[in-house]
Image (tube, rainbow, N blue to C red):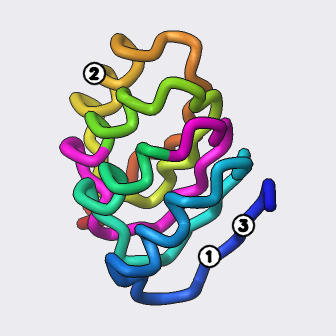
Amino acid sequence: LTYLDLSRGGPVPESMLRAISELKDLRALKLGYSNISGAGLRILSRLAKVEKLGLVACARVDDDAAAELAKWDTLKYVDLQDTKVTEKGLDALRRAKPSLEILFAAPPAGKPY
């Protein structure tokens, strides 16, 4: 299995994250609209071949979660649209992984996360 889309799947329990982390050939993972957090991304960091990660609208993805992504050696692309990652967290991720392609849009002025 090289591609897994669990977007809009709702809760992603730790047991599922641990099972996903065993998919050694996984290259693309979409977890949009889920409850994934920095702790969950730490579990998934064992995925040695993931190049693309979709985290659109994951309300628990914040600057700490973005810092976890800096540790993903093979990551080339991440979608962080509509997450709680701030410009500060984004800048830190860019400094840590300058070649990483990041899809990010700050929320409109006045719109809370």
The answer to whether 104 appears left or right of 74 in the picture is left
Amino acid tagged 2: Ala
The answer to whether 43 appears left or right of 4 in the picture is left
Per the rendering, the mark at residue 4 is 3
The outermost residue toward the bottom is 10
Image quadrant in which you'd find residue 27: top right
Mark 3 and mark 2: span between their CA atoms? Answer: 28 Å
Per the rendering, the mark at residue 63 is none
Secondary structure of residue under mark 1: loop
Q: Nearer the viewer, residue 30 or 94?
A: 30
Mark 1 and mark 3: span between their CA atoms? Answer: 9 Å
Q: Nearer the viewer, residue 106 or 11?
A: 11
- In the image, what residue occupies the spot 61% across and 27% down? 101
Quadrant for the N terminus in the image:
bottom right
Q: Nearer the viewer, residue 99 or 48?
A: 48
Mark 1 and mark 2: span between their CA atoms? Answer: 26 Å
Magenta residues, start to end: 47-65
Dominant secondary-structure state across the stretch colored magenta: loop
- In the image, what residue occupies the spot 40% across and 87% down? 11
Quadrant for the C terminus in the image:
bottom left
Residue 93 lies, in percent from the top left, at: 35, 25
The total number of labels drawn is 3
Amino acid tagged 3: Leu
Amino acid tagged 1: Ser
- Residue at which label 2 appears: 92
Secondary structure of residue under mark 2: helix
- In the image, what residue occupies the spot 23% across and 58% down? 39
Residue 60 falls within the magenta-colored stretch: yes
- Residue at which label 1 appears: 7
Asked if the residue under mark 2 is in contact with the one under mark 3, i.e. CB atoms within 8 Å, the reply is no
- In the image, what residue occupies the spot 56% across and 87% down? 9
First of labels 1, 2 by sequence position: 1
